[in-house]
Image: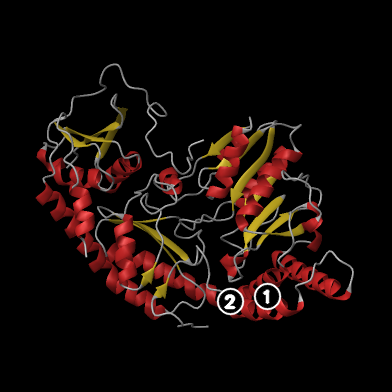
């Protein structure tokens, strides 16, 4: 399973997995055979429909749901938006209260903002230092007018697995449907049941981009927040991308089989990084739950270093990693996940190991990291000193540009 | 909601503690002005200068990068320093009070 098609080490599987070879062959095959409109009645259309339905059955089988509960969307984000806004819309008469955890993916929180702008009410449930929701606190946020609750299966920035089973039980007792954003888990980890809606994204399991899954359990009420459309049982608008969907299904089966064998090895590599980084780098904090975590992800923050500078330095050394530090995130604010956990937001690095990761690459990462951090700290400190880190009295305005100079003068 | 999307990075005074009428606790022995500096600079300045005050005394860091609101308390926890409080500054930004413990 080792792949060495690129020179550098790719450690950003949580953003996207390299396409699985099974996806590639399924995609090429169905580009030629399954291009017709699956809603039509002639031969090529029927064959396309058969391929679409087969893909649906295969994905449903891996997820342990019924095929008629599963729709394909155009992205994981679209699946999240449809689940949240459609779940809320269906229960409008019950109330307009929404409960979300503070560490949900931005797609969930943006959907919640839309709901708020639309006159709805949102309660945000906090997390502990490890980024984990307390099921009792979550249960305490549920009210008689709560229309929907949202909890991710596992966190996308720090890998902490959430207590979905306990929260699902609390939601069931309160009569509130639960939406689970399982984008980080599908294909890697089983997701507990008890939810009403579930979303995922194919490119996270080695499928192509542009395919998401939306599962709406039998008996769960849901009304599309979008204009009517006949596709995907009136749940998702637009002509289905059948070749990409077929590729996503093939990738999920293959990826899950690979992970069944490889996840323990990957998890052991993560344990090694978790143990080694604080030993070899001073002033560093490894964040997220050390045990109840996704197998492939580890996040740490290095004091006194800019996240962006560290990413750039690691990229120069041949490592592709991600960061929740403010200067690199989508927003200019620090990561809302790190903020909610109350951990250092600067100097943040997320390492997420892909399928077939070579342990030699992890060795090299651990060998290079201390020097990279030390070089950046040295550069920042000297920039501060030469630039005059003034500001002794409360009235002295901060001297301009010392930080900036330090940033630019770095190699 | 605490989550804020793209383009809303400016600190929003008043979403946490209102400006106190009178300072709670002893006045700082040292004020570090990190206004206009992005994290990690305020944290670096704090780490470099906290030893200028005697053990048991207060250092105040003034900063207007929202990341400092998370990073200053987190730094205190990591370094076993005592985070006393955060106050909102009238001119924008925050003052963070830290008691040197060792």
Question: Which chain letter goes with mark 2?
Answer: A
Q: Is residue A403 above or below residue A44?
A: above
Residue A250 is marked as 1
Q: Are marks 2 and 1 in contact (CB under 8 Å)?
A: yes
Q: Residue at x 76, y 31 (%)?
A: A93
Q: Position of residue A160 (x, y in %)?
A: 50, 56
- Residue A136 can be seen, yes or no: no
In the figure, residue A273 lies in which quadrant?
Answer: bottom left
Q: Classify 10 Å Cα crowding around label 1: few (below 14), some (14-19), many (20 and above).
A: many
Q: Residue A69 appears at what percent x and percent y?
A: 78, 57
What residue is drawn where x is 55% and y is 44%? A109
- Give the labeled residue for mark 2: A20
Question: Could you tell me if residue A366 is visible in this image?
Answer: yes
- Nearest the viewer among A28 and A293 is A28
As helix, strand or loop, the secondary structure at mark 1 comes to helix
Q: Nearer the viewer, residue A335 or A7?
A: A7
Crowding around mark 2 (Cα neighbors within 10 Å: few <14, some 14 to 19, many 20+) is: many
Residue A209: x %, y % from top left: 59, 65
Residue drawn at 34 percent across, 43 percent down: B67
Q: Earlier in the sequence, mark 2 or mark 1?
A: 2
Distance CA(mark 2)–CA(mark 1) = 9 Å
């Amino acid at each position: 399973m080792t792949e060495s098609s690129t020179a550098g080490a790719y450690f950003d599987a949580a953003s996207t997995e390299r396409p699985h070879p099974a996806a590639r062959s399924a995609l090429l095959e169905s580009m030629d055979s399954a291009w017709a409109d699956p809603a039509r009645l002639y031969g090529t259309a029927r064959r396309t429909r058969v391929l679409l339905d087969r893909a649906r059955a295969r994905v449903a089988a891996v997820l342990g749901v019924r095929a008629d509960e599963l729709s394909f969307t155009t992205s994981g984000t679209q699946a999240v938006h449809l689940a949240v806004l459609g779940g809320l819309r269906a229960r409008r008469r019950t109330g307009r209260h929404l409960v979300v955890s503070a560490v949900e993916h931005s797609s969930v929180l943006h959907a919640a903002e839309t709901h708020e702008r639309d006159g709805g009410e949102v309660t945000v449930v906090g997390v502990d230092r490890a980024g984990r929701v307390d099921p009792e606190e979550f249960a305490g946020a549920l009210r008689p007018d709560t229309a929907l609750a949202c909890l991710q299966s596992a966190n996308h920035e720090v890998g902490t697995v959430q207590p979905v089973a306990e929260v699902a039980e609390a939601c069931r007792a309160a009569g509130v449907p639960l939406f689970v954003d399982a984008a980080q888990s599908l294909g890697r980890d089983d997701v507990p049941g008890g939810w009403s809606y579930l979303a995922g994204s194919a490119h996270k399991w080695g499928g192509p981009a542009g395919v998401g899954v939306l599962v709406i359990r039998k008996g769960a009420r849901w009304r599309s927040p979008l204009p009517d459309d006949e596709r995907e049982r009136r749940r998702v608008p637009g002509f289905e991308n059948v070749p990409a969907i077929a590729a996503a299904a093939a990738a999920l089966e293959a990826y899950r089989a690979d992970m069944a064998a490889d996840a323990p090895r990957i998890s052991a590599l993560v344990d090694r990084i978790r143990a080694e980084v604080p030993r070899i780098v001073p002033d560093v904090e490894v964040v997220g739950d050390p045990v109840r975590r996704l197998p492939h992800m580890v996040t740490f923050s290095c004091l006194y270093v800019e996240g962006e500078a560290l990413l750039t330095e690691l990229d120069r050394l041949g490592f592709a990693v991600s960061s929740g530090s403010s200067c690199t995130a989508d927003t200019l604010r620090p990561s809302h996940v790190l903020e909610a956990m109350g951990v250092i937001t600067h100097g943040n690095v997320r390492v997420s190991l892909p399928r077939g990761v070579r342990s030699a690459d992890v060795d090299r990462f651990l060998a290079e990291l201390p020097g990279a951090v030390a070089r950046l700290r040295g550069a920042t400190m000297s920039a501060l000193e030469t630039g005059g880190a003034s500001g002794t009295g409360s009235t002295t305005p901060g001297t301009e540009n010392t930080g900036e100079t330090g940033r630019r003068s770095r190699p | 909601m605490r989550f804020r999307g793209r383009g809303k990075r400016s600190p929003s005074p008043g979403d946490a503690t209102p400006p106190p009428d009178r300072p709670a606790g002893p006045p700082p022995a040292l004020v570090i002005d990190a206004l206009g500096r992005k994290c990690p600079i305020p944290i670096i300045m704090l780490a470099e200068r906290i030893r200028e005050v005697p053990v048991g005394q207060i250092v105040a860091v003034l900063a207007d990068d929202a990341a400092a609101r998370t990073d200053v308390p987190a730094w205190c926890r990591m370094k076993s320093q005592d985070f006393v409080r955060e106050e909102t500054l009238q001119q924008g930004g925050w003052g963070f009070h830290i008691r040197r413990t060792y």
